[in-house]
Amino acid sequence: MRYLIIALITFFALPAYALAPVQEVVSEKGIKAWLIEDHTNPIVALRFSFRGGSALDPAGKEGLARLASATMDEGADKWDSQGFQSRLEDLSITLRFEAGMDSFGGRVLTLRENLDAAAEMLNGALTAPRFDTEPVERIRSQILADLRQREEDPDAIAALALYRKIFGDHPYARGSKGTLNGVASVTPSDLHGFVKDRLGKNNLIVGVSGDITPDQLKDLLDKVFGSLPQTAKDWQIAKADPQFKGGLQVINKAVPQSSILFAQKGIERHDEDFYPAYVLNYILGGGGFSSRLYEEVREKRGLVYSVYSYLADYDSAELWMAGAGTQNARVKETLDVVRAEWKKAATEGVSAQEVKDAKTYLTGSFALRFKSSDTIAAILVGMQKDDLPIDFLKTRNELVEAVTPEDVNRVAKKLLKPDQLMTVVVGQPEGL
């Protein structure tokens, strides 16, 4: 099955270079965007991000960025909440905001004929959001309900506990969703202050794809972002000092299936060994049905419902994460097998065939990411956030192809630290 999937991806995937080249566009007011033109359909997708996210929420106001992201499109300038949302619906415009740990951003997806209206509404949401009482309290209630639900969710409990163990008193330890008390304490004045302080031209990143030319994009950029403050409040946070000392924390929760999370030190995106680590992660647990963890933990032993690993790269910390979910009676065996596979990869390495198969999948599936103008615009933002070169879409597969089995095994020996895996289990595991 694994080889069939790889073969199908290789056969059907269009290469990334089939896309138009990425162009850097700079407006008259100095706003920069990366653009991929696609005039096949009359659709324009715009993604944007401001550096600095929920990790910057003030103490006692945890959830400020999240509440702002959920209410900025609930009325702006001359439109109240109902008027704003009704106009978006009437013109088939998608306008959303989102808050992450290290960034705050959003997107617009619109028909070309409604681009001017979309620009006007996005500019209003960015520069003159109303934060009227009714929509703010309505959205606040929804977020509080979600946070209460997360307090009962084993996966969410495990993630928050693990981050607290790793990050201590660093803002990352709070997660990105906010707290009940923090969200409840945010005032309309806080929300207006967030928009005033955190959204500026100097921390703005923009990616655009679709039916628009560079000259048209220049006008769009100034219409949407030209009236933003030149400078945002400093978005830098202290470098985290994550602690990976191994050990196991069990959190008792009356559920039939335990949630398991592991973490150790990861690798920075621009480290020269990133791509060998990327290939290694695919082999270890990132490759779904093709991964070692899936084969050993699920296929051979039937221990889990799910098992995976991934690299997490934050602005101020890097993690290598793994997770699984299994019956309480099978937790101990699952922990033993995952740790054994982590150690086996570190000490015995991986085979040349595994590296070849991983590279075939990772290069062949890359083009499948470019499935819509919206996802392409998001990729362009991600490239800029990660300080990748503008020709990255052309060179990325070459970087993966250049990885050798020797590279992967050297990195496995250097980076994988089974004795440093921090582990959290939420449930009622037996035998621990």
Image: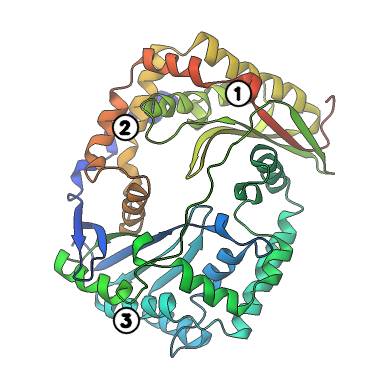
Query: Where does the N terminus fall, quadrant-wise?
Result: top left
Label 3 environment density (alpha carbons within 10 Å; few <14, some 14–19, many ≥20): some
Q: Which residue is mark 2?
A: 363
On the image, the x and y values in percent for residue 379 come to: 34, 50
- Secondary element at image label 2: helix
> What residue is pinned by disc 3?
117
Q: Where is residue 271, by image quadrant?
A: top left
Left or right for 136, reference 8: right
Residue 300 shows in the view: no
Instruction: State the residue position of label 1.
Output: 299
Query: Can residue 411 be spotted in the picture?
Result: yes
**Upstream in sequence: badge 3 or badge 2:** 3
Camera-side mark, 3 or 2: 3
Location of residue 86 in the rendering, given as x and y in whole percent from the top left corner: 46, 84
In the image, what residue type sits under mark 2? Thr
For the point 56% across and 41% down, the residue is 240
Pick the front one: 203 or 112: 203
Which-is-in-front pick, marks 1 and 2?
Answer: 2
Q: Earlier in the sequence, mark 1 or mark 2?
A: 1
Whether the residues at callouts 3 and 2 have beta carbons within 8 Å, the answer is: no
| Front-lying residue, 424 or 18 | 424
Residue 284, compared with residue 118, is above or below; it is above
